[in-house]
Image (tube, helix red, strand yellow):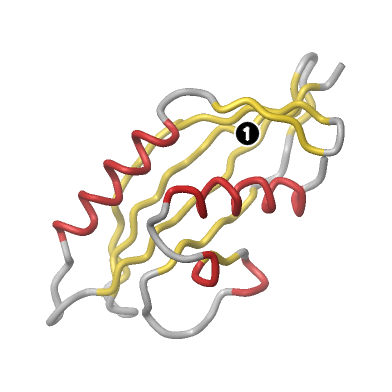
Amino acid sequence: MGTKDIELVMIQACESLGIVPLSSIYVPDDYPEGVDERILIHVKSQQRGDIFYKGFVEVNFVCPDENGRANHARLQEVEDILVDAFRYDTVGEYRDDTYRYGLHSVQTFAEKEAKYHYVNARLLFEILNI
């Protein structure tokens, strides 16, 4: 299971959250310009372990600023959705590989020059290696 496979798994997971439509979920090669509400998924490299390949996936929900200020209500709403969705490990199979992922941390960041804030959910993604 490679990084593109992990991206597909995470796109499906993010689509099911109902935060934004599928057309607003992107991976690094597809990041659009502009400041619309969207989800950006970035898969980090996987490290081989005895039982699992382990790596992190960054799921970033971008929320445009309103009148030069953060939309705190929307950021909190999205953070709550992400925590509820990823709090417990999700286990699944993809192309005969068994995987699991779950929330490692969640934070809100500002991109003042770009005029948006985003909620970053860092997920530990593990693929069974036996």
Give the camera-side residue of 36 and 55. Answer: 36
All told, the count of numbered labels is 1
Residue type, numbered disc 1: Phe
Residue drawn at (54%, 72%) of the image: 23
Question: Residue 122: x percent and y percent?
Answer: 47, 41
Compared with residue 14, is residue 93 higher up or lower down, i.e. above or below? above
Position of residue 90 relative to residue 74, above or below, is above
What percent of the width, then of the height, locates residue 97?
Answer: 82, 30
Q: Is residue 10 left or right of residue 95?
A: left
Q: Secondary structure at mark 1?
A: strand
The N terminus: image quadrant: top right
Name which residue lies at 40% across and 50% down.
Answer: 120
Image quadrant occupied by the C terminus: top right
Q: Residue at 22%, 74% (x, y): give it.
A: 65
Q: Mark 1 highlights which residue?
A: 125
Residue ID at (40%, 28%)? 87
Q: Is residue 70 left or right of residue 100?
A: left
| Mark 1, other Cα within 10 Å: few <14 / some 14–19 / many ≥20 | many
Residue 60 placement (x, y as % from top left): 44, 56
Q: Quadrant of residue 91?
A: top right
Q: Using the rendered view, name the quadrant where residue 22 is placed.
A: bottom right
As drawn, is 7 to the left or to the right of 38?
Answer: right
